[in-house]
Image (tube, rainbow, N blue to C red):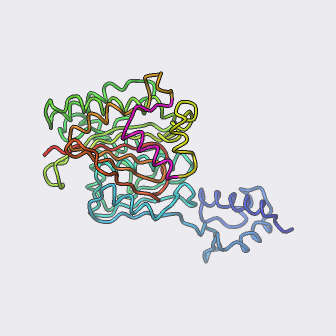
Amino acid sequence: MGAYRESELVFMKQDVYRVLCDTPGLKGREIAKKLGKEKPEVNSFLSKNKDTFYQDESYCWFNKNVGTTVEFPSSWIDAAKYESILADYENLFASQGGVTFVLPQGCSLLLEPISRLLALSNQLEHHCIDVTIDMADCGNTRHFLNRAGFFDLLSSGVKVLPKRPKSSTAKVFKGTCDSLVEFGSICPKSKNKELIVSLHSSFLDKTCEDYYTVALTVFSEFIGNVSEHSNSLIEGFAALQIYEPNYKRDHIQTVISDSGMGVVSTLRSTLQDHYPELYGRFPDDGVESDIGLVLEVFSKGNITRHGKASGRGLGFKSTREQASKFDADLSIRLDTFNIKLRYRGGELADPVIQKNLTKMNGTHICFDFYID
């Protein structure tokens, strides 16, 4: 067998790796048959690449790289803790051998990290990464996720351990819990009125009419923007959870998520034409400029990829004006960073910015309104 050129070596590794992902524990002749190659050629290749493949005592071959395992702690996990754990994995989209998320006994997640786990799992699976969520020792959380509709929106290609629930308790009991609005998909060809009404009604049930306008504005504007601007084959979604009185301050947490282009890419597609001044201030040259552009959009609003004259698009001006009347936190998760805007006493406090997070596509919004 002649020596492999570098490109041939890469393709051969990929081919053998895929075969052993689908059917681990094959002998050399079986691998050769599946690849349409000669047995001596494949055996020679395998013996020279034991950094990638290994052979057991029965002369069966396996992939040495068993994938990436992300294990969460046995505690309550908020968005900050979730991101600190995932930050150890710069880009899970480059994982070989798949990605496994392990939720051990005693692991409980707030709605925001649940939504990010859902979006990331679907994105990875969509990019042909094998994804497993292991909740074999975390029955209580698995039951809650079922009740919240997590599995209804989780891609069917994502493996769940010990197994997926046989039925959806979210569908059976939908709308019967006054502290939860189950995960609902955002349809790109609809105004999603039913989802907006459900979120709005639950919000008002736990607050008062003072919140009528702000709640309606938040849900309508953000869900509308997902519908119009996402351009994703993966469904966006929204959900709401009320936390009282045992988790720090009483508050209502709402998540709105899409796995599309993201706010930055959406705006940059026409920024030079419609906002040359902003294009000059925030050129497309790195994450710092992206963060500056997002802060401009969410703190000032009135910016849209269609231009000022259109009267539509990614403005968020109304949301900003309404949210500033209450104590609220707005988190915007994009690509590899997160921005948290905090409204206190009618004023916008200094933003909290997290950088160097694990890569995730799209725009993921979380609103916390403090109601105590």
Instruction: Using residue 105 as the reference point, say whether residue 92 is left or right of it.
Output: right
Observer-nearest of 291 and 276: 276
Question: What residue occupies the far bottom of the structure in this picture?
Answer: 57
Observer-nearest of 79 and 128: 79
Observer-nearest of 76 and 141: 76
Residue 197 picture location, percent across and down: 26, 27
Residue 140 picture location, percent across and down: 25, 55
Q: Quadrant of the N terminus?
A: bottom right
Q: Residue at x 22, y 34 (%)?
A: 175
Q: Residue at x 29, y 34 (%)?
A: 321
* Main SS category, magenta section: helix
Residue 82 picture location, percent across and down: 36, 58
Instruction: Using residue 104 as the reference point, say whether residue 95 is left or right of it.
Output: right
Q: Quadrant of residue 299?
A: top left
- Residue 21 in the image: above or below residue 58: above
- Residue 235 in the image: above or below residue 356: above
Q: Quadrant of residue 352?
A: bottom left
Q: Which residues are magenta?
A: 287-305
Question: What residue occupies the far right of the structure in this picture?
Answer: 2
Instruction: Using residue 134 as the reference point, say whether residue 207 is left or right of it.
Output: left
Does the magenta segment cover residue 371?
A: no
Q: How many marks?
A: 0
Residue 336 picture location, percent across and down: 47, 53
- Residue 360 in the image: above or below residue 310: below
Q: Quadrant of residue 78?
A: bottom left
Observer-nearest of 370 and 274: 274
